[in-house]
Amino acid sequence: MQPDQASTEPSECDTIEELFAALESPLLGYALRLTGELSVAEDMVQEAFMKLHAQFDEVREPRRWLYRTVHNLALNHRRDASKIVPLNPVRGQNGSEGVESADPQPLPDEQIVRLESIGLVRLSLETLDDRSRELIRLKFNDELSYKEISARTGLSMGNVGYLLHHALKTIAEELAKNGVVK
């Protein structure tokens, strides 16, 4: 069930930026109703806009496409969440419950790869302007919501999402150049 969308979007949105400005808040509300979790809803809306950005020229009805994409992402999230099975304790030989022991430390080569990746992410962050770096820090280090970032920076929530989207895209491109992501 989708909200009445006719009142949330101008008759024509020629650019993804206009679509984002018109639909980010209504889509966020829609995703929040579907998931019940603000951070998950924010991630879904951002992912939907990123997917749209990648194929903007091919999508004939971007508003309908965005709502359908958010809806599908919410269904996928529910399905994936239902697959999580709690870890049951292992029964010991004497019938008592114990926990199977495993070394929690990653292997040395895994640690090296992780540290190299972290270093490359930090270098990629340096390619961003100060405002974008600050938004990334607030979102991922301080774990603030778009609303909290908006209040702290004075930017609109739509602008926060837009700037974060482009900052993350820039970082992803830098990481792809360095072979960290494909």
Image (spheres, helix red, strand yellow):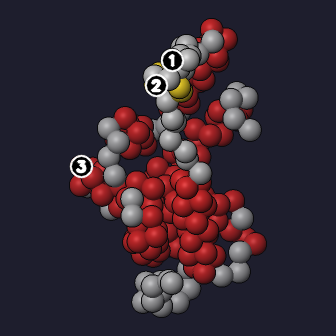
From the viewer's perspective, tell me whether residue 112 is left or right of residue 182.
Answer: left
From the viewer's perspective, tell me whether residue 106 is left or right of residue 157.
Answer: right
- Residue neighbourhood size for the residue with mark 1, other residues' Cα within 10 Å, grouped as few (<14), some (14–19), many (≥20): few
Q: Is residue 15 visible?
A: no
User: Where in the figure is residue 96, as x and y percent of width and height?
Assistant: 45, 22
Q: Classify residue 146 by image quadrant.
A: bottom left
Residue type pointed to by label 3: Arg
Q: Classify residue 38 by image quadrant.
A: bottom left
User: Where in the figure is residue 9, as x and y percent of width and height?
Assistant: 47, 83
Would you name the residue on which mark 3 appears? Answer: 152
Q: Find residue 94 and name its label.
A: 1
* Residue at image coords 71%, 80%: 60
Residue type pointed to by label 1: Asn
User: Where in the figure is residue 79, as x and y percent of width and height?
Assistant: 59, 59
Tell me if label 2 and label 3 are in contact, CB under 8 Å.
Answer: no
Callout in the foreground (2, 3): 2
* Residue at image coords 34%, 52%: 145
The quadrant in which the C terminus is found is top right
Residue type pointed to by label 2: Glu
From the viewer's perspective, tell me whether residue 119 is left or right of residue 28.
Answer: right
Would you name the residue on which mark 2 appears? Answer: 97
Q: Gap in Å between the C-alphas at discs 3 and 1?
A: 57 Å
